[in-house]
Amino acid sequence: MNYMKEALKEAYEGINNHHGGPFGCVIVKDGKIIGRGHNRVLLKHDSTCHGEMEAIRDACEKTGSHDLSGCELYTTAEPCPMCLGAILWANISKVYYGCNVNDTDKIGFRDDKFYDFFNGDNSILTLEENERKECQKLFNEYNKDKEAQRY
């Protein structure tokens, strides 16, 4: 099976139904598609509903686990920083993408703003520590419970 063609089918479904941008994704484990998704930002009025995020949510729901170790992800475009974070949190070990960030920039998507921020541009977003001691109490309480699931 050509998994990128399946990701493309997802993307076409999304753009043909005006769900969002041209981003489709499938997640594969042991030669089987276990998760599918396409951009649903406009449909759900939710800026986190990128194709990769939707596919990860689908795969996690279907497997009953947040851990997608051993999976591969096929996506129509190079993942944005948010999606890369989710891919890493899900323990996905390999990503195949079609278009790169320069291609997505040409059609109006702004991944470059995120890279500017990561490179020190504080005009985009301000991060400020607040109530650290109270939050540390919370972390200590969590750490006491050895049965708590770790991420």
Image (cartoon, rainbow, N blue to C red):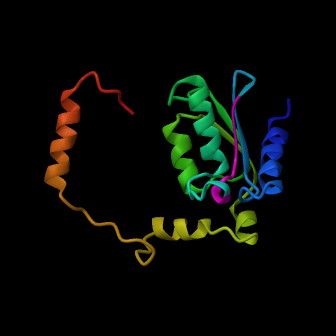
Asked if residue 109 is positioned above or below residue 135 in the image, the reply reads: below
Which residue: 62% across, 54% down?
44
Which residue: 85% across, 41% down?
5
**Residue 124 at x, y percent in the picture:** 45, 74
Residue in front for this viewpoint, 128 or 54: 54
- In magenta, the rendered stretch is 34-42
3 displayed left or right of 148: right
Residue 75 visible within the image: no
Q: Is residue 24 magenta?
A: no
Residue in front for this viewpoint, 17 or 4: 17
Q: Which quadrant of the figure has residue 115?
A: bottom right
134 displayed left or right of 22: left
Residue 12 visible within the image: yes
**Residue 79 at x, y percent in the picture:** 64, 52
Which quarter shows the N terminus?
top right
Which residue: 83% across, 44% down?
9
**Residue 101 at x, y percent in the picture:** 68, 62
